[in-house]
Image (tube, helix red, strand yellow):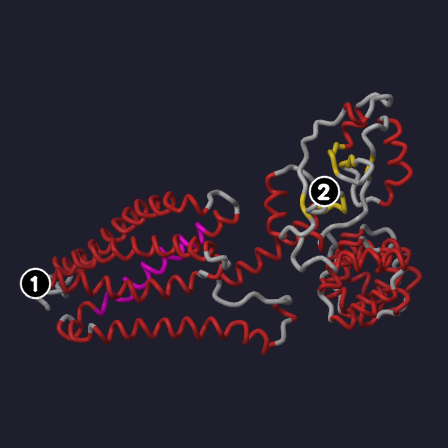
Amino acid sequence: MTSPETVDHITSLIQEGEFFKLKKILRSFQPAELVELIENEDEREQLIIFRLLPLQLATEVFEYLDLEVQRHFLDNLAQDKMTEILNEMSPDDRTALLEFLPANFVAELVQNLSEPERRVTLQLLGYPEYSVGRLMTPDYIAIRENWTVGQSLDYVRQHGGQSETLNVLYVTDARGVLIDDIRIREFLLANPATRVRDLMDHRFVQLTVNQDQEDAIDVFRRNDRGALPVVSADQGILLGIVTLDDILNIREEEDTEDIQKFGGSEALDEPYMTTPLMRLVQKRAGWLVVLFLGELLTASAMQFFEGELQKAIVLVQFIPLIISSGGNSGSQATSLIIRAMALGEFTLSEWWRVLRRELAGGIMLGLILGLVGFGRIAIWQTISPIYGPHWLLIATTVGIALVGIVLWGSIAGSMLPLILRRLGLDPATSSAPFVATLVDVTGLIIYFTVALVMLRGTLL
């Protein structure tokens, strides 16, 4: 971590123009420390610090900066320096940056790359958006099964500097088809004369180049690997590898998108602080209008039961209690189910198991809240007889209604994400506000229906 004292010292050196001294100090920092330092400085200081870094260190730092800071550097640094950095960047990180930029800007940057890097970049950008191909890097070590361990390690020493990771070596045949992957520790522990084929077990996990990035997240989660090979879908030819750091970035983006949707708004394309205000309003307004129109149904339901409300005005006191209980139970169920689906804890074919659990859980939760509601009315009636001679019927009405509403909220909240997934939609769209609005309307209908049955002939 970069201490506030260090940041102040760096800032003071910049203000005093002590750039030679600052350059020497910056070279002693680790890339992660420099990233934190740059992101804590103002834009002018960010540019000065970055200009003073040697090429290799500047490239490492640039790869880990936020996309907005990277864009700021691209706009303000000399074209020659940025071209050098882009050429030095790993292909997957460079592709992630170019995806974020306008098409005309990308075309100009790609044109300035060296021939080998331009070819690799265009190849990666040619894969479908959100596919594994956009994440992979062609920098890996591939060996042959007839090599010895000694030959393989010699090859690693010669070419390992070009690889994204050396945790795993990939075994391919003469056509480049992946036939196995072997952890480097197996080579380090084996006799140098041992053949690679003797270390192979033909058990390996692979991704296909057109596979969806979300599928890749699940594959990484189920397998203890820092990188996975990417092959062509038709012939299984090894094309590149995807490393864990890229998967973690995608996981963060997916989680952020789901959380934003779950809060009742469209997912933001940019960080919150850099999203234009009108764009932010546009993202939020649509869902607010939909939810507002949904709540109009709540008003319609109350209008439908206006006569009953006039006869038993006491029922109005419990409407907020009824609405909040149903919405809360539905939101709870939705949250649990969406998270369980994201973790692969069950499949769509097991929906009946979810329904069975929510039926049982909803009844028990409803009974708990129903007893609390009944007890609240009973206690208040004991202190002051505000509910009149029919307080027991009122308490029973509230208690039964709570059981039904909480049960319905649990079922609706758990089944809606499954229905959306079955329809090929994002389950996060069944956000907590949406479920709450749905349960509000139906909850009032349940409440007043119970009241009509329980209070007919007395208050109604």
Tell me: 460 left or right of 326.
left
User: Which residue is the extreme one toward the left?
Assistant: 457
Mark 2 or mark 1, whichever is nearer to me? 2
Tell me: 410 left or right of 128.
left
Q: Which residue is mark 2?
A: 236
x, y percentage for residue 380? 18, 60
Query: Which of the numbered marks, if any, corresponds to residue 239?
Result: none
Q: Is residue 90 visible?
A: yes
x, y percentage for residue 37? 76, 59
Task: Give neighbour class at mark 1: few <14, some 14-19, many 20+ (Cα, 10 Å).
Answer: few
- Point 19% across, 58% down: residue: 377
| Residue 103 lies within the magenta run | no
Q: Which residue is mark 1?
A: 389
- Point 53% across, 58% down: residue: 258
Residue nearest the viewer, comparing 375 with 417 = 417
For the magenta stretch, what is the residue range?
316-337
Q: Amino acid at mark 1?
A: Pro
